[in-house]
């Protein structure tokens, strides 16, 4: 009784308890009380987790270039449970990106972005970008080597914008170099600006979901028409409606709990991310790479030809984001079911496979030289058996001249250039000499780095590399040339003999 | 008539006749609109310093960025070798900590001719490493490669390494450093002529005699 009295007292003053209750209990078509409809709420719960853990981390974190890295190590090692809070925040971020992407794919494949939920989708696209913005700025908060060089990559991309490139770099860094001002402004973005926009965006997003209702389960052949959809949805809700809380929301709640539990488990078992080395740009023995969500971009940047890089970097994101924003306006009506939308299914598949491949490549960066292969990976013993002294000298040259940084032998070494295990079955001696001295096909020229003796030794060693004793490559034209030369010389010998004979006769 | 409106967007004056509507444009309505306009003006004036503050880092004149930094004695750089050396950026602020430091590669070609390269790859700014045996700079990020004179050898970079301007003062090697070297904020400022030696020191310019380095710089400038 007392509880009821207090709640009535509160409601009389607040006035929004009843409206909230009504909103929670709003009827929703029974066919969308499905496990497929749980991603949005899980993303919201993850956002709450990030807000809470972020505030707790801010109690200790020091957003200063002098101290940030040290304060993270302090959190990891000296603050009780500091490591766990960092791990929760880091894993929460990865889970949030994954769940937001799943939510996007589900909404796209279910055609839920169509009339009247176009704006809900557009706000959702902005929320995705803000989530990625949080991930990038969060990576900068972990002010370590990867963060430092990640900022360098960001600045280098900004510098490619025509005319205002330099100004953009200075705006991004807060000055001419990466430093305290840079960390401060990324801290401001990560802690004030983007979270504010994110929370406001989520509020608008959820309000629109309440206004239009959670989309009904798509059926092949049941088309969305602007003239009839809202009436049909209303009738469906009237006929089959369930109160969202609790009849549909229990699944959301179970899934959210499972996700939070997964974050807790990952945080507990795998621990926090970094920080890696200190953000000291004079330590250049580093191979910077971005966080998981951005690995695919890192990979794409390795494959773009130089002439296309700037246009692609500047134009592709604009096109992609514009395309996503305009999607519901261009395809706001018609079929919703994935079985009747092959282009949609194909697009998702292609994009997912592409992102997956590039992310996978980003984890082992085959385009990067292995900086210590020349001193770390020895020439396999089997390639040294029965070799002449010159050929063994060539193996030394191969190691010394750091060829192994880009070329592998027996699976060890860099993957930037082709493996050399069977090089002599692909290229003739002349071709190898030319390739080594002049380079080409993405290989630098070594003409200045090798003297003739070294070249001779190196090539004679390479000529022994024929895989499983394959035939050596041969120059078919050379044989022809030799034959024709022999004929010529035979012919000229004949004529010379004839001339001598003639001369003898004349004598 | 009830004071409550029946639906959002409904106005009390909807049901009125034109004359009554005209009469409804009271002095209070006029004053309110005037006050809104006043706030817009105050807001605009307020926005000027706020935006100015925000754009401050971009407003600095490019020629103001950078200064000469001493890299140390000439004897630290043996002729024919390329060495890594550290310096504190002249642009470093009080709160930059160790990020205020940076490195560069110093190549001493002959007694008085040098090339000083930024460590930042011309592709996306990662730190390039010098491999003296293969006479190449290699980038760990995307595999950009440069020859010993800084020119592009292979990989995604579209140009050679960024070069600092240098000068020799007595026994010291000085470079002009400022911006983080990127494609639009190069190690050397655009406005200043890309002659490594200042005009005030013709003797050194002559002795340094780097026609090839100067020519390359200008071609890179495009």
Image (tube, rainbow, N blue to C red):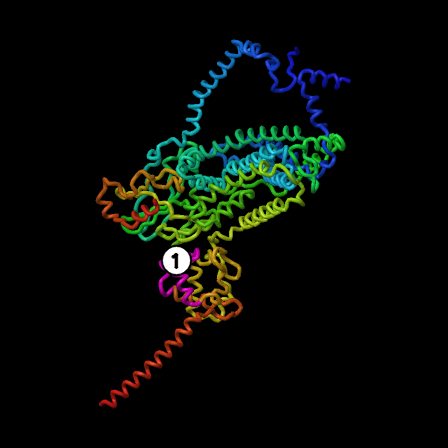
* Front in this rendered view, residue A268 or A147: A147
Badge 1: residue crowd in 10 Å (few <14, some 14–19, many ≥20): many
Q: Is residue A147 left or right of residue A231?
A: left
Please provide the residue range marked out in magenta. A428-454
Residue A45 drawn in magenta: no
Please indicate, yes or no, whether residue A343 appears anywhere in the rendered image.
yes
* Front in this rendered view, residue B131 or A33: A33
- Coordinates of residue A340 in the picture (x, y in percent): 66, 44
Q: Is residue B10 left or right of residue A436?
A: right
Q: Is residue A1 left or right of residue B26?
A: right
Q: Is residue A80 above or below residue A418?
A: above
- Coordinates of residue A99 in the picture (x, y in percent): 62, 39
Please indicate, yes or no, whether residue A59 appears anywhere in the rendered image.
no
Residue at coordinates 43% horizontally, 57% vertically from top-left? A441
* Front in this rendered view, residue A437 or A167: A167
* Front in this rendered view, residue B104 or A348: A348
The answer to which image quadrant residue A397 occupies is bottom left
- Coordinates of residue B155 in the picture (x, y in percent): 44, 52
Q: Which residue position is annotated with label 1?
A: A445
Residue at coordinates 37% horizontally, 58% vertically from top-left? A449
The answer to which image quadrant residue A1 occupies is top right
Q: Is residue A126 above or below residue B183?
A: above
Q: Residue lying furthest front in this view?
A: B18
Where disc 1 sits, the SS reads loop
Residue A453 drawn in magenta: yes
Residue at coordinates 43% horizontally, 50% vertically from top-left? B144
Q: Chain of mark 1?
A: A
């Amino acid at each position: 009784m007392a509880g009821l009295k207090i709640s009535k007292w509160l409601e009389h003053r607040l006035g929004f308890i009843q409206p909230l209750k009504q909103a929670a209990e709003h009827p929703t078509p029974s066919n969308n009380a499905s496990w497929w409809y749980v991603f949005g709420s899980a993303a919201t719960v993850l956002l709450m987790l990030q807000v809470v853990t972020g505030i707790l981390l801010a109690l200790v974190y020091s957003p200063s270039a002098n101290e940030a890295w040290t304060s993270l190590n302090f959190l990891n090692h000296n603050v009780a449970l500091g490591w766990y809070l960092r791990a929760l925040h880091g894993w929460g971020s990865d889970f949030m990106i994954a769940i937001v992407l799943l939510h996007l794919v589900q909404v796209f494949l279910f055609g839920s972005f169509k009339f009247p939920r176009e704006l809900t989708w557009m706000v959702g696209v902005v929320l995705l970008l803000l989530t990625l913005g949080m991930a990038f700025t969060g990576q900068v908060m972990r002010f370590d080597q990867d963060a430092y060089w990640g900022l360098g990559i960001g600045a280098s991309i900004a510098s490619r914008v025509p005319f205002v490139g330099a100004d953009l770099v200075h705006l991004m860094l807060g000055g001419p170099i990466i430093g305290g001002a840079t960390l401060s402004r990324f801290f401001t973005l990560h802690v004030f600006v983007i979270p504010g926009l994110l929370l406001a965006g989520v509020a608008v997003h959820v309000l629109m979901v309440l206004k239009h209702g959670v989309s009904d389960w798509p059926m092949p052949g049941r088309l969305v028409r602007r003239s009839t959809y809202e009436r049909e949805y209303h009738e469906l809700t009237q006929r089959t409606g369930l109160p969202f809380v609790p009849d549909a929301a229990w699944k959301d709640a179970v899934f959210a709990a499972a996700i939070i539990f997964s974050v807790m488990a990952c945080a507990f078992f795998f621990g926090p991310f970094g920080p890696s080395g200190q953000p000291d740009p004079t330590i250049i023995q580093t191979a910077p790479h971005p966080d998981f969500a951005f690995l695919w971009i890192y990979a794409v940047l390795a494959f773009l030809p130089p002439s296309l890089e700037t246009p692609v970097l500047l134009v592709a994101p604009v096109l992609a984001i514009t395309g996503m924003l305009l999607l519901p306006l261009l395809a706001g009506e018609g079929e919703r079911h994935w079985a009747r939308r092959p282009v949609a299914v194909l697009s998702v598949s292609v994009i997912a496979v592409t992102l997956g491949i590039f992310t996978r490549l980003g984890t082992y960066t085959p385009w990067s030289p292995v900086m210590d292969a020349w001193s770390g990976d020895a020439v396999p013993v089997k390639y040294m058996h029965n070799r002449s002294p010159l050929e063994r000298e060539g193996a030394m040259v191969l190691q010394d001249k750091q060829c192994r940084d880009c070329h592998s032998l027996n699976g060890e070494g860099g993957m930037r250039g082709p493996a050399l295990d069977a090089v002599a079955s692909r290229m003739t001696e002349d071709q190898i000499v030319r390739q080594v001295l002049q380079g080409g096909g993405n290989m630098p020229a070594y003409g200045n780095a090798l003297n003739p003796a070294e070249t001779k030794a190196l090539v004679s060693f390479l000529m022994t590399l024929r895989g499983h004793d394959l035939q050596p490559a041969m120059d078919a034209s050379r044989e022809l040339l030799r034959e024709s030369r022999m004929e010529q010389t035979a012919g000229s010998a004949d004529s010379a003999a004839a001339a001598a004979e003639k001369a003898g006769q004349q004598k | 008539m009830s004071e409550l409106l029946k639906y959002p967007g409904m106005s009390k004056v909807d049901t009125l006749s034109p004359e009554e509507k005209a009469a409804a444009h009271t002095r209070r309505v006029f004053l309110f609109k005037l006050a809104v306009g006043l706030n817009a003006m105050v807001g605009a004036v307020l926005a000027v310093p706020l935006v100015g503050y925000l754009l401050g880092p971009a407003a600095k004149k490019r020629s103001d960025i950078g200064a000469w930094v001493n890299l140390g004695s000439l004897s630290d750089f043996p002729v024919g070798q390329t060495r890594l050396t550290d310096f504190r950026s002249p642009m470093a602020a009080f709160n930059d900590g160790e990020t205020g430091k940076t490195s560069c590669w110093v190549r001493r070609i002959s007694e008085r001719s040098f090339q000083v390269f930024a460590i930042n790859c011309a592709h996306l700014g990662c730190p390039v490493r010098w491999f003296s045996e293969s006479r190449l700079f290699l980038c760990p990020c995307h595999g950009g490669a440069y020859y010993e004179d800084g020119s592009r050898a292979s990989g995604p970079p579209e140009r050679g390494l960024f070069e600092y301007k240098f000068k020799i003062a007595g026994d010291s090697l000085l470079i002009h450093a400022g911006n983080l070297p990127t494609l639009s904020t190069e190690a050397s400022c655009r406005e200043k002529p890309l002659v490594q030696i200042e005009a005030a020191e013709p003797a050194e310019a002559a002795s340094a005699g780097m026609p090839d380095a100067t020519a390359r710089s200008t071609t890179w400038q495009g």
